[in-house]
Amino acid sequence: MGADRWTVASVPERGQPWKILEWWKILKSRGTAATAIGTVVLVLATFFNAVLLAPAAQAASLVTVTLTFDDAHVDQMAAAAYMNSKGLHGTFFTPSGFLNSDSLHMTTAQALALQAAGNEIGGHTVTHPDLAQADTGEVTRQVCDDRTNLTNMGLRVTNFAYPYASSTPAIETIVQSCGYNSARGLGDIASQIPASAGMPLSETMPPADPYLTKAPDQIDSTWTLQNLKDLTLKAEPGAGWMQYTFHHINIANNPLNVSTANFNALIDFLVAEQAAGRIIVKTVDQVIGGTVKTNPAGPPPPAPITSGNLLRNPGFETAGPVAGGAPSCWVPGGYGNNTYTYSTVTGAHTGTAAEQLVMTTYLDGDAKILPPLDTGQCTPTVTPGKRYTMSAWYNSTANTQFELYYRLGQGNWQYWTSSPLYPASAAYTQVTYTSPPVPAGATAMTMALTLTSLGTLVTDDYSLTEAVLPPGAFEPLTPMRLLDTRTSSGPVAPDGTVSFQVAGVNGIPASIAAVTFNLTVANSTSFGFVTAYASGTVRPNASNLNYDTGQIIPNSVTVPVGADGKVTLYNRSSGTAQLIADVSGYYVAGTAAAAGAFQPIAPTRFLDTRNTPTPVAPNGTVSVQVGGVGGVPANVSAVTFNLTVANSTSFGFVAAYASGTLRPNASNLNYATGQIVPNRVTVPVGADGKVILYNQSSGTAQLIVDVSGYYLSGVATLPGTFEPIAPTRFLDTRNATAVAGDGTISFQVGGVGGVPATAAATIFNLTVANSTSFGFVTAYPSGAALPNASNLNYATGQIVPNSVTIPIGPDGKVNLYNRSGGTAQLIADVSGYFL
């Protein structure tokens, strides 16, 4: 029996979701002792009761060869094309959770194309777990729901393969009950693997047990072309069935790889053997036969824990189903080239059990024990946009850190992020980490402390709770449209107002302090400006967005929210205007006290050079006192204000920066001659409480500053708090290639330029230049769907800026989408980040 019966399921590797590192499978298949290898990955948990199944009947007069392919790797498509071109077809065992998961796996369209070309699609569970270590409910969901998912995609699915060849008689019964006609094992037929000596040379026809059909070990990179041919040649004296199992084709350095040359040569050999009348090549369905049976759904997962500690068995006190194995609802896992062991030990922080990892050899990767990547049996349910705080007690001889994974839907698990490193500790020490906001579409998460070097790690008493953010903390959201008068109330009247609800809608709490949104004016019938302010308060002497007749122009706004949860927009104009508001985050209610927390104020005018003797000179500066005036404390870290340029005598731009610091290579607002243009600015404040505004122009300009809030001084440490940085250019496509029409560019924020890899959101100034047509730009976190929102509208050739506050994707990136019929250059100047 091959070692795949013993292996464990995979964890998505950092940066390469779902990459399966299969040295464990290979070592097991060669009879190596069951030491957990770092290329090993996650197990689910729990056994079943046994029920035997009746075999199907089928006769054979010559050797039947079947080519099977596991795990829906996209590199199998080229192999299928060559195989099909020679008149042969194969069976592709496909975990439905892998489809459409990333660039390494097939899409639904590719699976349908394989079927249309005459190949068979088989079931392989939703998430590829070790079924022998999962409970009955989880096994049934994995097997039945996988078939349901594939069927709903338009695929005909009648046969199954056990992940890691892990099965029991009880699991065979479940496979049959889910409507399958057969199920393939591995490692029961003689091959070049020494441990297989003495095994049969082929499966019988018909198989003695159609729900555990015999096959050689999976083919790996050590197999020669002759080894591949020998499987068929040695079986030819009989009249049995030979199933080949492939994973990767032409993927260098992958342990389960077969070169294109060897694969194509094998196909040519099989074609010749079939032409000579010694074999016949069939799919599993052609061998087994049978009808397409009904497709029952798996049972629903148990109700999730919704309050307090969301983890099941957080202290490891409940044993798992396998004697000597992992505790209930915990599994060992990891990735990379390393060797580790795990065990339950008695030196617990509380109770009687703790979990110990010992890394004995290490090249790369990690090892861990964590809640399994399942369909809902054990892993905690989470809500997109919310943060979660995790803690654990540990002692170790090496550094450790939390690693986080999230699930999309019911089966697509992705690596998410990691905490900072925690040092070795001889005594039990508690560590706590709060996640970034859960990505859009995520339904569950899992996490654990890991070993990433030689050493020993003991963990106990995990906790996972919904995070409680301090007052003034920022909660970023994927941009969502909460107001569009074009589709609701109609244009706002001259000197009219419109209010829109923010608090209590689309997952935003009923009580918040302030909101950040992108405000856009469209279809205006005259020039004017818009002022945003908290509903129920007096309209301030301030503005947020100035516009000309017919102009489409945006500006970012941060403003307090009224007691009724609304924001009011006032249209100061002799004409009407359509207003659109796309919300990208909110600030937690309460009086800000933590370093980096935000305290909103009613928009207040702090500077208006029109009331001074002279405008700002060409290449001149003006300072604005912020700290210690207008209700702002003397010592603040950063300030948010609306900056407006008016009465300019030439084109130019304005850069804002902290007093007493060097002027950055960045800009906040670009303007044309005579143009009235605003932009929101978030910038550090100097030690003297001032902000400097630099006018880069050959002409003069009037500058107006309306402050709407400030960030408390000190080093930000709590989730949602803000850490300003000197404005820094993170992206400038003028130094590379313009962004194409309907094209997207990503730029790295987390982990570069002083921004930590774990940052949740960022503030940057976005500028469009050299556009060849009109259009708009939408900013959104990498990994999220493109939202129905915009951040910056532009005309052909226009240089226009806008401030953006946006979540950062799990990979530390932000996407910029250029909705246009032409190209555009994009520049991003980052001024800070939120933890």
Image (cartoon, rainbow, N blue to C red):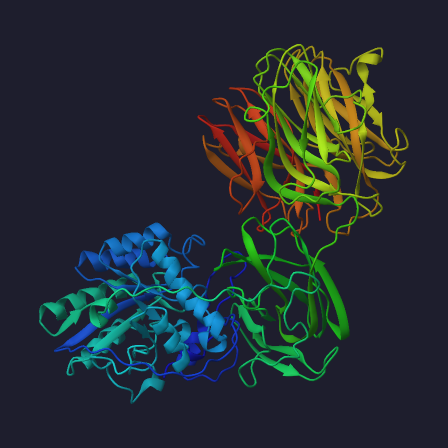
In the image shown, does 327 or 2 lie closer to the viewer? Answer: 327
Q: Residue at x 45, y 32 (%)?
A: 742
Q: Residue at x 69, y 69 (%)?
A: 462
Work out whether residue 676 can be spotted.
Answer: no
Q: Residue at x 82, y 47 (%)?
A: 595
Work out whether residue 504 can be spotted.
Answer: yes
In the image shown, does 211 or 262 lie closer to the viewer? Answer: 211
Q: Residue furthest bottom?
A: 198
* 109 to 483, vertically: above or below: below
* 735 to 261, vertically: above or below: above
Q: Residue at x 63, y 82 (%)?
A: 344
* 502 to 18, vertically: above or below: above
Position in image of residue 51 (x %, y %): 38, 83
Residue 320 falls left or right of residue 510 = left
**Quarter of the image where one finds residue 814:** top right
In the image shown, does 88 or 180 lie closer to the viewer? Answer: 180
Residue 139 falls left or right of residue 475 = left
Give the position of the N terminus as an image quadrant. Answer: bottom left
Position in image of residue 97 (x %, y %): 44, 59
Numbered-mark total: 0
Q: Residue furthest left?
A: 276
